[in-house]
Amino acid sequence: MIDEDSPPILTEITGSIAIVRFNRPAQRNPLSLDTLQELRRTTSALFSRDEIQTVIFTGAADVFASGADIRELAQLDAQAALEFSKFGQDLFQTIADARQVTIAAINGYCIGGGLDLALACDVRVASKSALFSHPGARLGIITGWGGTQRLPGIIGRARALEFFATVRRYSSSAALEIGLISHVGDPVMECALECARAVTNPS
């Protein structure tokens, strides 16, 4: 059982591969401000290390990440909301620009800002039980962390518009069909590690 008093992010390094795991499954691994700040510290440290060639992002239990904490968002005024949005944009752009190969090992729910994070990665692989959605339209909001820019480039403008507007949940097989992910398999971490090893040892 995962201790909810432990850090919101756990990091494991084996050789040239780093695994970054979101660790609040009881709350569906929200990307709260505290978690984003810890993610910035973690990625900054990892991306500065020459020996790290691949960084894998995943979640604890059956959730990858569920995006911003809605209760937290409700407390923000306009200026604070703008700053929060820009913080997430800058962080995910840093991940997108990383020298290392970044892999999203999507082990379950990948929702809202969690999907934005996956979109910022170079490679996305998923478990058979993973689910993908951007529920913002149902809440009267839209993601501010770069998903609206990245998703059309990955699955096409028309499909991306449908994705955002209908709030449909996509299964792994549907996500694979539209090109959102590149592989489906269980255990998903083994799929991600195979990708990482291929990058590390291309021969």
Image (spheres, helix red, strand yellow):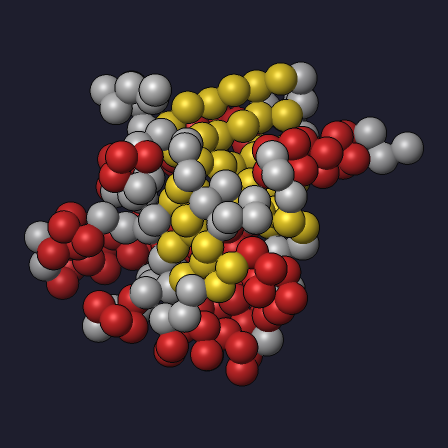
Q: Position of residue 145 (x, y in %)?
A: 38, 58
Q: Position of residue 13 (x, y in %)?
A: 57, 19
User: Going by the image, does 117 lie left or right of 27?
Assistant: right
Image quarter where the C terminus lies is top right
Q: Nearer the viewer, residue 194 or 48?
A: 194
Q: Nearer the viewer, residue 27 or 97?
A: 27
Residue at point 46%, 55% (across, down): 131
Image quarter where the N terminus lies is top left
The answer to whether residue 134 is visible is yes
User: Going by the image, does 106 lie left or right of 79?
Assistant: right
Residue at point 15%, 48% (across, down): 72
Which residue, as the protein is rendered here, is positioned at the far bottom?
A: 158
Residue at point 67%, 22% (across, down): 16
Q: Position of residue 42 (x, y in %)?
A: 43, 28
Number of marks drawn: 0
User: Going by the image, does 62 lie left or right of 7?
Assistant: right
Q: Is residue 75 above or below residue 25?
A: below
Which residue, as the protein is rendered here, is positioned at the far right?
A: 203
The answer to whether residue 93 is visible is no
Q: Quadrant of residue 197?
A: top right
Q: Quadrant of residue 9?
A: top left
Q: Is residue 112 above or below residue 51?
A: below
Residue at point 54%, 28% (across, down): 19
Q: Position of residue 31 (x, y in %)?
A: 31, 44
Q: Nearer the viewer, residue 99 or 30?
A: 30
